[in-house]
């Protein structure tokens, strides 16, 4: 009987801890995303000065066989995950966008980053995105159901995995 009581207490403790950690992760970090703020590993000044545009990244991805490692990109944040701050989108010069995830899900960004210019450091690739994944991120972005339902085919896009992000203006 004691063993069952101990086992029950351990189970309750573990589930409480898991719930507390999930609750802790349930919203993006607070912050105003002011110039100079960094997220993740940050971006060194020497890297920041070598940042290329999203348009140049697209050309580089075509040239380098769909993958570019250790690159710095500059651009404007157009959207941030409302749930956790675990992804964002960057606007390109031709008014399209590319998707950014944080390396190893190790850091998140505040929603205040939306509309700010940033430099990202990390790896980029062209990737085919499944219908289910597109719908998942559309739900995260709180898109209208009609827009989510309209997603009906995989699409190829630029995906960027950021090691660090710095707000530049």
Image (spheres, grey):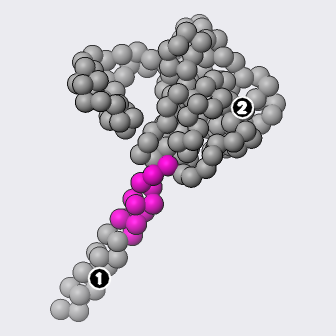
**Is 85 in the magenta?**
no
Which residue is drawn at the image coordinates 24% and 25% (left, top)? 146
Secondary structure of residue under mark 2: loop
Residue 74 position within the rendered picture, expressed as x and y whole percent measured from the top left: 67, 24
Count of marks overlaid on the render = 2
Q: Quadrant of the N terminus?
A: bottom left
Residue 114, picture quadrant: top right
**Residue 62 appearing in the image:** yes
**Residue 61 appearing in the image:** no
Residue closer to the observer: 43 or 23: 23
10 Å crowding of disc 2: few (<14), some (14-19), many (20+): few
Residue that protrudes farthest toward the left in the picture: 1
Which residue is drawn at the image coordinates 30% and 30% (left, top)? 144
Residue 155, picture quadrant: top left
Residue 125 position within the rendered picture, expressed as x and y whole percent measured from the top left: 52, 21
Residue closer to the observer: 2 or 114: 114
Which residue is drawn at the image coordinates 45% and 55% (left, top)? 25
Residue closer to the observer: 113 or 25: 113
| Residue under label 1 | 9
Above or below 64: residue 139: below
From which residue to which does the magenta span run? 17-28
| Residue under label 2 | 169
Of the residues under marks 2 and 1, which one precedes in the sequence?
Answer: 1
- The secondary structure that most of the magenta stretch takes on is helix
What number is the disc on residue 96? Answer: none
Q: CA distance from mark 2 to mark 1?
A: 51 Å
Residue 103, picture quadrant: top right
Residue that protrudes farthest toward the bottom in the picture: 2
Above or below 49: residue 56: above
Q: Quadrant of the C terminus?
A: top right
Secondary structure of residue under mark 1: helix
Residue 120 position within the rendered picture, expressed as x and y whole percent measured from the top left: 64, 31
């Amino acid at each position: 009987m004691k063993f069952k009581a101990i086992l029950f207490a351990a189970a309750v403790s573990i589930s409480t801890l898991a719930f507390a950690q999930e609750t802790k992760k349930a919203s993006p970090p607070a912050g105003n995303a002011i110039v100079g703020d960094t997220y993740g590993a940050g971006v060194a000044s020497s890297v920041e000065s070598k940042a290329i545009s999203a348009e140049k990244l697209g050309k580089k991805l075509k040239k380098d066989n769909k993958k570019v490692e250790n690159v710095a990109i500059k651009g404007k944040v157009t959207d941030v995950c409302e749930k956790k701050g675990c992804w964002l989108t960057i606007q390109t010069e031709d008014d399209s966008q590319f998707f950014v995830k944080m390396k190893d899900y190790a850091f998140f960004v505040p929603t205040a980053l939306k509309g700010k210019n940033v430099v990202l450091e990390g790896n980029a690739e062209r990737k085919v995105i499944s219908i289910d994944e597109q719908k998942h991120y559309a739900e995260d972005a709180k898109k209208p159901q009609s827009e989510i339902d309209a997603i009906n085919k995989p699409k190829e896009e630029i995906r960027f995995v950021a090691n660090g992000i710095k707000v530049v203006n």
